[in-house]
Image (cartoon, rainbow, N blue to C red):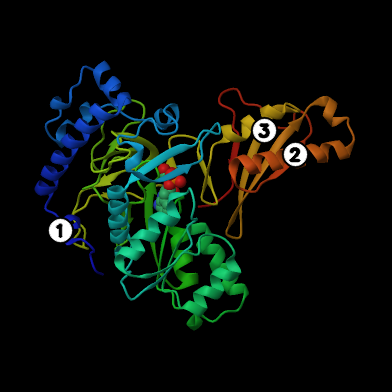
Amino acid sequence: MKIWNQKFECMPREQMHMLQSERLIDTVNRVYHQVPFYKKRMDSMGLLPGDIKSIDDLTKLPFTYKDDLRDNYPFGLFAVPMKDVVRIHASSGTTGKRTVVGYTRDDIDMWAEVMARTLSAAGTTSDDIYQNAYGYGLFTGGLGAHYGGEKIGAAVIPISGGNTKRQIEIMIDFGSTIISCTPSYALYIAECIEEGMIKREDIKLKAGLFGAEPWSENMRKDIEKRLGILAIDIYGLSEVIGPGVSTECEKQCGLHVNEDHFVPEIIDPDTEKVLGPGTKGELVFTTITKQALPLLRYRTKDISSLNYDSCECKRTLVRMDKVTGRTDDMLIIRGVNVFPTQIESVLLEFGETAPHYQLIIERKGSMDELEVQVEMTDSLFTDEVRKVEDLERKLKFNIESTLAISCKVTLVEPKTIERSEGKAKRIIDKRKI
Ligand code: DLL
């Protein structure tokens, strides 16, 4: 398969080291002088931009946390004036405050470049018809992947997520050869194709780029078999750029990180010490070319490890292991990031139930279903059924509008949710992924 950018994707390691050093020095200077938050944090550590002489000094720099973005909501960490910002995206937050990210024109170009690499790694060329079923909107998936597809010269269908019947009709009528969506949605599409008794030869798909949520090797095999395609894992997060941070190549043995733009580290989340290649820990990224929102040592909370061995595909870019877990309790349900505390705050705001709840997530077919079980107070329990049902409806409405995903709310009898002596077990994740 074609490598989109030989120069950077196959750069000798020593040269990459030099390039990263130059770009890091520039980034540190910019954030120190243009983002008061970073000046303050570096000053408090007695660190000056001049102390950073190469990429080897990365560990001297402070970490950045998701809460830092929230505390500086919405634009406080931007390193350029708003006149230079041409795009804003956002992802969900715990207490209604979203994580807001901004892009300059150069950032958008760089994003298209890394997504062009990603799409090429799955075999996309200008001859392809590319059905992009990631959500368009504040989520970075839709527009992020879109620009990469156009850069390659593929014919991009900006279909966005949902409306599966239409997805399949268009897939057949337009002859889509490449698809991108969350892996769980890919399985749902496969199911609908099977149910519709559609013949495989009516579908021209050859590869899919799946990410935005964790998925296992078993799920990959299932998708590949049922859709008859090559299934490639793609990873990214809004804070760093969106999709395009890393991608598998056709060898499917780890995700190549675009480290000429995003420098990865693996740390022990408790001691914060950097861990060596092959050791699992928390993935941390420093952006070294981003203009609007450069981030130093951003703590992703995703668990992975790094592998610097050469890859058969000839790319020299370091590979990260498939992300299968997180260090916090963030759940990804149908591609939407959900923190249990978001649901908790809706329940507590209502104040008509007991403060004991549990989230049950199941995969029915290929779709994730969320059930929120909440204990009734004694007085509510003795009330009429109509009142209980009414409250269930109201809670459901409020949770759904806060989280932007559908759920079922069940009020259960007082004292039926198991109590715990340590951390409460709020999540029962029955999905086998
Ligand atoms: O999910 C960006 C994206 C869009 C990636 C489309 C790939 C494809 P956020 O909404 O900010 O951004 O969520 C980022 O999703 O920290 C991981 O926990 C999880 N995640 C993303 N890709 C993968 C993957 C987009 N391939 C959060 N495997 C990240 C496992 C993933 N988890």
Q: In the rendered view, tell whether residue 129 sits above or below residue 372.
A: below
Q: Is residue 316 left or right of residue 413?
A: left
Q: Which mark is residue 230?
A: none
Q: At 59% across and 28% down in the image, what residue appears?
A: 424
Circle 2 — which element?
helix
Q: Which mark is residue 7?
A: 1
3D distance between C-alphas at marks 1 and 3: 53 Å
Residue 250 visible here? no
Circle 3 — which element?
strand
3D distance between C-alphas at marks 1 and 2: 56 Å
Q: In the rendered view, tell whether residue 322 sits above or below residue 396.
A: below
Along the polypeptide, which appears first: circle 1 or circle 2?
1
Circle 1 — which element?
helix
Q: At 59% across and 46% down in the image, what residue appears?
A: 404
Q: Percent position (x, y) of residue 256?
A: 27, 53
Residue indicated by mark 2: 394
Mark 3 residue type? Tyr
Q: Is residue 198 left or right of residue 25?
A: right
Mark 1 residue type? Lys
Q: Which mark is residue 357?
A: 3
Question: Which image quadrant for residue 345?
Answer: top right
Residue 183 visible here? yes
Mark 2 residue type? Lys
Which residue sits furthest front?
83
Q: Percent position (x, y) of residue 59?
A: 22, 29
Ligand 1 neighbours mark 1 (CB distance < 8 Å): no
Circle 1 or circle 3, nearest the eye: 1
- How busy is the neighbourhood of tag 3: few (under 14 within 10 Å), some, or many (20 plus)? many
